């Protein structure tokens, strides 16, 4: 049976009740905390930075999955390791020397992730896939929560899964943006291993139950 990992995105939490929302995730069936860091340059929005991540890490009892939507991520790799990140994803589009960046992330003891924008072709990962622990397939344009899911994602995930198999890589696939109970099953069927969910979880009447339902729905 598939154990699909569920990663609620803190971007959709109530920042005035952050500790409460973190405890909700700690006590739920969620697997990871997904943390979106935006710089207002790589994406047209600014989320939050290091002091907020430090506050989250103080209470979070599960894997901390950090998604950097920033230019020049290399200069902050050690900082994010020190802050408690377990998985660190950089954007393919933000890295001129991706191979070097991934080695630097691993050297700090973290899993190395690569996020790709909706327009970025899977074939571009062919020469680097064996060095990537996780590919974060963006199913919306990065920068904002609450956007609608881009349908072409299924085809991309299918292609990515085929590439991973062809290369004998152990890379896992994460989907980020617009994930709901309407697309979760199909995403897992085409190869997704981790589902990020922001608004679908936090805007639900019962977030804990919504996480449990998503977990159950994707275990088959
Ligand atoms: C978008 C972020 C996502 C976002 C997902 O730039 O990378 O992680 O929080 O939020 P939803 O699930 O609401 O689309
Ligand atoms: Zn994200």
Image (cartoon, grey):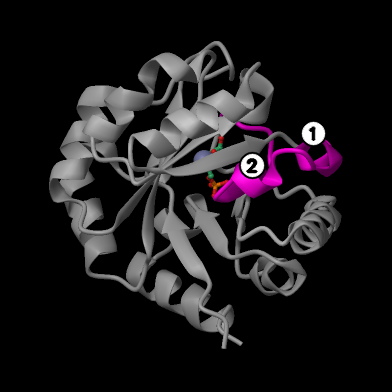
Question: Residue 64, position in %: x, y?
Answer: 33, 48
Give the quarter of the figure containing the N terminus. bottom right
Using the image, determine if residue 163 lies above or below residue 105: below
User: Residues under labels 2 and 1: Cα distance?
Assistant: 19 Å
Q: Which residue is mark 2?
A: 147
Residue at point 78% right, 54% down? 160
- Residue 98 visible in the picture: yes
Mark 2 element type: loop
Please report whichever mark, 2 or 1, sits nearer to the chain's N-terminal start. 1
Q: Nearer the viewer, residue 157 or 49?
A: 157
Residue at point 42% right, 70% down? 211
Farthest residue to the left: give it. Answer: 58
Instruction: Give the extent of the magenta segment.
Output: 120-143
Classify residue 132 by image quadrant.
Answer: top right
- Residue 139 visible in the picture: no
Q: Which residue is mark 1?
A: 120
């Amino acid at each position: 049976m598939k154990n699909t990992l569920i990663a609620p995105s803190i971007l959709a939490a109530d920042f005035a009740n952050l500790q409460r929302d973190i405890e909700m995730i700690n006590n739920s069936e969620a697997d990871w905390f997904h943390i979106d860091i935006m710089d207002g340059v790589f994406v047209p929005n600014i989320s939050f930075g290091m002091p907020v991540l430090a506050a989250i890490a103080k209470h979070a009892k599960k894997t901390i999955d950090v998604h950097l939507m920033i230019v020049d991520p290399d200069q902050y790799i050690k900082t994010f390791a020190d802050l408690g990140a377990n998985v660190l994803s950089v954007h393919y589009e933000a890295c001129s020397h991706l191979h070097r960046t991934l080695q630097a992330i691993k050297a700090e003891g973290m899993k190395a992730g690569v996020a790709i924008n909706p327009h970025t072709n899977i074939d571009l990962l062919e020469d680097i896939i064996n060095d990537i622990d996780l590919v974060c397939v963006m199913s919306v344009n990065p920068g904002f929560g609450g956007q609608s899911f881009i349908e072409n994602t299924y085809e991309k995930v299918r292609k990515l899964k085929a590439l991973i198999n062809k290369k004998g890589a152990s890379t896992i696939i994460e989907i980020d943006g617009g994930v709901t109970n309407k697309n979760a099953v199909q995403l897992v069927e085409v190869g997704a291993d981790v589902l990020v969910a922001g608004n679908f979880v936090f805007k639900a009447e019962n977030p804990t139950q919504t996480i449990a339902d998503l977990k159950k729905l994707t275990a088959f």
